[in-house]
Image (spheres, grey):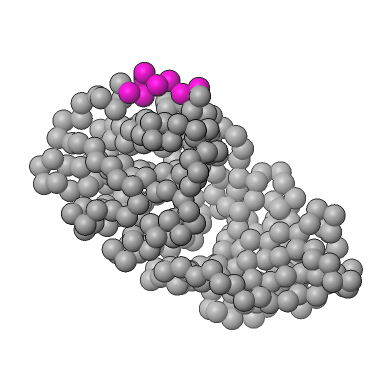
């Protein structure tokens, strides 16, 4: 099948990335697929790009996916990117396509869900009431309060050593503008960002946090974003404590919420254990794929065909 690839103007921009888009159409003008390429622009990630290719099931294996991939690879290379990542569920058509296109598995992710109707409310409440000497919990909705802003930005360093397998993720550099931009992006989508933080009582600094994004109507499933504790405060049960508090608050403030979703790297046994202890159950496995972009034409691939 002869496929036409058209570059589109994508209005989606953020403080940390911009996005390119392409549309694949058949000779009769029917749309058969599309691709998005996210180009990370913040310091520490300017080598990185992220691909999302989607082809209608009835149109697969007819060249549309390869044509979209070629367009994205060329754009990434022209922009000076050296690493291209993409994600696909295990044993899916997307997984097979990426592996046939020179991508390699760099990280395995286990997705889990906590059905709130089945949550052990009493056990969760007991966890929240448990004593953690020298610490207290604080929570807020939306953008971090001004009085906690600087220390919350500093606490983002807790994500620096997050297990990422072989993914060339680079270094995510956080400042107050980036924190506020992330919260604003959630609000712009009509969703609610809820944060629970662990605070060191000796100096009032935030030493850990967990974030949850709730649909605007308070229904369906909410999505955990990040949970992390600064290295010098680990091993004291703070992640379990904060996440239990997040679950309890979500149930109380959004009674029609059905469940909570999260994903954890298989090489992060501590966070997997936290989720298991809280009642999260596996739903599926996904792979983070990576392909190195080495030059105008990579060995073994004919990007012009």
Q: Residue at x 76, y 66 (%)?
A: 66
Q: Quadrant location of residue 170?
A: bottom left
Q: Residue at x 33, y 33 (%)?
A: 245
Q: Is residue 162 magenta?
A: no
**As displayed, is residue 128 above or below residue 32?**
above
Q: Residue at x 53, y 78 (%)?
A: 80
**As displayed, is residue 291 above or below residue 294?**
above
**Image x and y of residue 38, in percent:** 55, 67
Q: Quadrant location of residue 85?
A: bottom right
Residue 301 visible within the image: no
Tell whether 203 sits left or right of 149.
left
* Of residues 10 and 277, the one drawn nearer to the viewer in this rendering: 10
**As displayed, is residue 149 above or below residue 116?**
below
Q: Residue at x 40, y 49 (%)?
A: 193
Q: Residue furthest left?
A: 202
Q: Which residues are magenta?
A: 118-125
């Amino acid at each position: 099948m002869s496929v036409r690839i058209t570059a589109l103007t994508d209005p989606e921009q953020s403080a940390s990335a911009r996005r390119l888009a392409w549309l694949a159409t058949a000779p009769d003008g029917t749309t058969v697929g599309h691709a998005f390429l996210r180009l990370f622009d913040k310091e520490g990630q300017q080598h990185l790009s992220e691909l999302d290719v989607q082809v209608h099931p009835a149109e697969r294996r007819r060249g549309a996916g390869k044509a979209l991939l070629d367009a994205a690879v060329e754009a990434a290379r022209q922009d000076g990117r050296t690493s291209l990542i993409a994600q696909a569920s295990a044993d899916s058509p997307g997984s097979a396509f990426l592996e046939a296109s020179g991508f390699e598995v760099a990280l395995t992710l286990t997705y889990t869900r906590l059905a709130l109707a089945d949550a052990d409310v009493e056990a969760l409440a007991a966890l929240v009431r448990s004593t953690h000497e020298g610490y207290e919990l604080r929570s807020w909705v939306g953008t971090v309060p001004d009085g906690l802003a600087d220390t919350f930005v500093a606490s983002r360093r807790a994500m620096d050593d997050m297990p990422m397998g072989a993914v060339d993720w680079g270094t995510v550099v956080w400042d107050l503008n980036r924190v506020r931009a992330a919260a604003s992006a959630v609000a712009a989508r009509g969703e609610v960002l809820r944060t629970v933080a662990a605070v060191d009582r000796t100096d009032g600094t935030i030493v850990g946090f967990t974030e949850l994004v709730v649909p605007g109507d308070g229904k369906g499933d909410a999505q955990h974003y990040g949970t992390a504790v600064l290295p010098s405060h680990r091993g004291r049960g703070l992640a379990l404590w904060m996440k239990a508090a997040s679950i309890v608050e979500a149930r109380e403030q959004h009674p029609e919420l059905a469940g909570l979703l999260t994903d954890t790297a298989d090489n992060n046994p501590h966070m997997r254990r936290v989720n298991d202890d809280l009642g999260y159950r596996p739903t599926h496995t996904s792979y983070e794929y990576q392909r190195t972009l080495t030059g105008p034409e990579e060995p073994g691939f004919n990007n012009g065909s």
